[in-house]
């Protein structure tokens, strides 16, 4: 796991101090080693976290004839198989690293090399033969890649803040992107908070000529849902067991010690189960909890630790931990409002004290139908058939009073705008009231990537429609962004066995009703196959308890007239507040007074980000 950067100027050469500054901006991603390469107006930079081939895996790495060079962030889990194929075709290797295998895979197959990869990756190849840069990002978007593009300069990096070290770079604020942040709590690709910087989408590659032009942008893979209705549930469980165990085994390839995040939920518990079966030593597990019982899952993590005999580590976090917010904001480089970034930061810090790499259970909810929003969505589309009688009677009244949150079922049905009401943090009406008049004509009325994703789901069932949309939006730009940045702040590599091309393609064959259906006495349940798999080792009470997630107790921390409530008011409403340049003060006051602290958290993160940034409106 590493940090990568690159610069291509059109009218001047690159000096060593410039590429050094850009490379050093991602130092936390690669604390073990630094490498740079400069050739006139082109440069590459790399910061390394040594996981595989510690002695010889230096970057950038070039072919013997210097025609091709690469910087790479991630891990290729099938690199040994690819290496055998390439050796048979006459390639010779100087190292034992997956980086060199990736480089020669590009030499042999050019852009088609991405179709052969199993892993998480963001990489850039300098192709002197074709006079171009080739950049690619992994299938699901586990590893990030952003780029800065003007007439004079093309630059790329693992983090936005590195691009600000490019000489003479200019950054202007994209108001529509900030509005999308308020809508969703993150900014989806290709946008960033800046007009000049874009995100490369997952499963995409791009080519940039040495003349500084983007000459290709292509999606090389997409998940295809094709339900197989012939198999029984027991057959699916048996195959799922095999697929997950294989993925965990593949993700354990490393030359350093490793452990696992353990929340106590279904997904991380299954990862720990397979690790305990595959490893000869005890698994190191790491958990974070809260003093507030409604948010604390530590007792469940302890149950799993005892069951699988792990070496367990845990910590409790309190409101004082918010002191690290400025540091977190600086690493994300743009507004990012998922409050679970704070516990993710601390569990990463805890893990890094013991190991440089962990496995996590992220990515199972999106492909195995685990989110509560899916349950509410299906109940909504079923017209409340699963609701108690009193809810059915009151539903028309609730729809009339709160149309933003509960749109009339018969008016919209399974439309995108309807789904957005289930996942939005701030409706268009509320955002319009919040922004000052000077900005209201710049706001987003729709989001291109959501429309594009939802349009591809016309032939899919109601549940799969929204799962696919989450896989294309929420998964890469919220969940994976959160984990990547929070872990890389500590130089910790996080691997995600559920978010594996083989696992996702397998799960896409499972009929929706196998993963999601009614359970007697429990109502609609998602992730049924995973739950039944874990039930072989854990109790029914453990497996079928209510999903908690990893959110912070914001209401409990900020509610009332205590110190943290006063600090919140001071931060958002004082004369020094940057928010007041863009938003109506009375609307912010209403949110605080009405205890809308999940929304207020978005403003708190945005306020800190605006204080740190120097942007042109």
Image (cartoon, grey):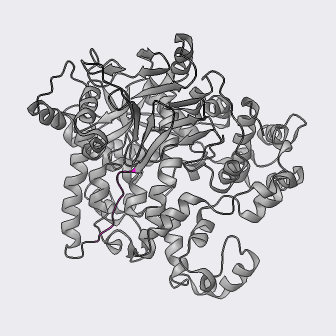
Query: What residue range appears in magenta?
Result: 219-227
* Residue 179: image location, x then y, percent: 70, 52
Res. 595 visible in picture: no
Q: Is residue 315 left or right of residue 519?
A: right
519 to 216, vertically: above or below: below
Between 143 and 395, the one nearer to me in the picture: 143
Judge left or right: residue 183 versus residue 106: right
Name, please, the residue furthest toward the left: 88
- The residue that appears at 37% across and 26% down in the rendered structure is 355
Asked whether residue 224 is drawn in magenta, I would say: yes
Residue 328 lies, with reference to residue 416, above or below; the image says above
Q: Quadrant of the N terminus?
A: top left
- Left or right of residue 255, residue 407 in this image: right
Prevalent SS, magenta region: loop
Q: Quadrant of residue 562?
A: top right
Give the residue furthest to the top: 16
Q: Quadrant of the C terminus?
A: top right
Q: Which picture quadrant has residue 593?
A: bottom right
Was residue 267 drawn as part of the magenta stretch in this picture?
A: no
At 41% from the left edge and 66% from the top edge, which residue is drawn?
526
Residue occupying the point 76% across, 32% down: 611
């Amino acid at each position: 796991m590493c940090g990568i950067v690159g610069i291509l100027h059109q009218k001047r050469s690159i000096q060593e101090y410039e590429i050094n500054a850009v490379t050093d901006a991602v130092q936390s991603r690669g604390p073990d080693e630094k490498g740079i390469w400069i050739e006139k107006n082109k440069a590459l930079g790399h910061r390394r976290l040594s996981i595989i081939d510690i002695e010889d895996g230096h970057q950038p790495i070039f072919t013997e004839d210097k025609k091709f060079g690469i910087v790479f962030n991630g891990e290729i889990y099938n690199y040994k198989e690819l290496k055998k194929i390439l050796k048979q075709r006459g390639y010779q290797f100087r190292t034992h690293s997956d980086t060199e295998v990736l480089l020669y895979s590009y030499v042999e197959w050019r852009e088609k090399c991405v179709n052969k990869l199993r892993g998480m990756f963001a990489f850039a190849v300098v192709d002197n033969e074709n006079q171009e840069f080739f950049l690619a990002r992994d299938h699901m978007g586990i590893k990030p890649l952003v780029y800065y593009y003007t007439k004079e300069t093309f630059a790329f990096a693992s983090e936005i803040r590195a691009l600000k070290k490019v000489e003479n770079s200019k950054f202007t604020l994209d108001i529509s992107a900030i509005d999308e942040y308020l809508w969703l709590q993150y900014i989806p690709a290709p946008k960033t908070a800046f007009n000049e910087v874009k995100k490369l989408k997952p499963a995409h590659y791009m080519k940039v000529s040495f003349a500084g032009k983007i000459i290709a942008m292509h999606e090389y893979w997409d998940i295809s849902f094709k339900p197989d209705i012939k198999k029984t549930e027991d057959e699916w469980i048996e195959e799922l067991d095999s697929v997950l165990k294989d993925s965990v085994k593949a993700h354990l390839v490393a030359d350093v010690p490793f452990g696992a995040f353990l929340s106590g939920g279904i997904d991380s518990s299954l990862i720990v189960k397979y690790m305990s079966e595959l490893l000869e030593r005890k698994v190191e597990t790491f958990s974070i909890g809260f003093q507030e019982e409604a948010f604390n899952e530590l007792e469940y993590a302890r149950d799993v630790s005892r069951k699988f005999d792990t070496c367990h580590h845990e910590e409790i976090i309190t409101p004082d931990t918010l002191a690290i917010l400025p540091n977190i904001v600086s690493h994300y480089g743009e507004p990012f409002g998922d409050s679970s970034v704070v516990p993710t930061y601390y569990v990463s810090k805890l893990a890094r004290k013991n190991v440089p790499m962990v496995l996590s259970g992220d990515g199972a909810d999106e492909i195995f139908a685990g989110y509560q929003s899916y349950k509410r969505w299906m109940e909504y589309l079923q017209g409340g058939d699963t609701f108690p009688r009193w809810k059915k009677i009151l539903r028309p009244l609730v729809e009339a009073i709160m149309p933003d949150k509960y749109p009339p079922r018969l008016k919209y049905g399974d439309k995108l705008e309807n789904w957005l009401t289930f996942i939005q943090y701030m409706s268009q009406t509320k955002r319009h009231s919040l922004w000052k008049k000077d900005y209201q004509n710049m706001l987003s009325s729709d989001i291109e990537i959501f429309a594009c994703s939802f349009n591809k789901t016309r032939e899919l069932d109601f549940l799969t429609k929204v799962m696919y949309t989450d896989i294309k939006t929420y998964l890469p730009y919220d969940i994976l962004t959160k984990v990547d940045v929070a872990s890389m702040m500590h130089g910790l590599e996080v691997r995600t066995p559920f978010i594996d091309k083989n696992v996702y393609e397998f799960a896409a064959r499972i009929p929706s009703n196998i993963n999601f259906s009614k359970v007697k006495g429990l109502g609609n349940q998602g992730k049924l196959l995973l739950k039944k798999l874990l039930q072989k080792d854990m109790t029914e009470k453990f497996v079928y308890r209510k999903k908690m997630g990893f959110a912070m107790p914001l209401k409990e921390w900020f509610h009332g007239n205590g110190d943290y409530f006063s600090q919140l008011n001071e931060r958002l409403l004082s004369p020094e507040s940057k928010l007041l340049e863009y938003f109506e003060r009375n609307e912010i006051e209403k949110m605080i007074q009405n205890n809308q602290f999940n929304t207020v958290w978005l403003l708190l993160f945005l306020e800190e980000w605006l204080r740190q940034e120097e942007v042109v409106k």
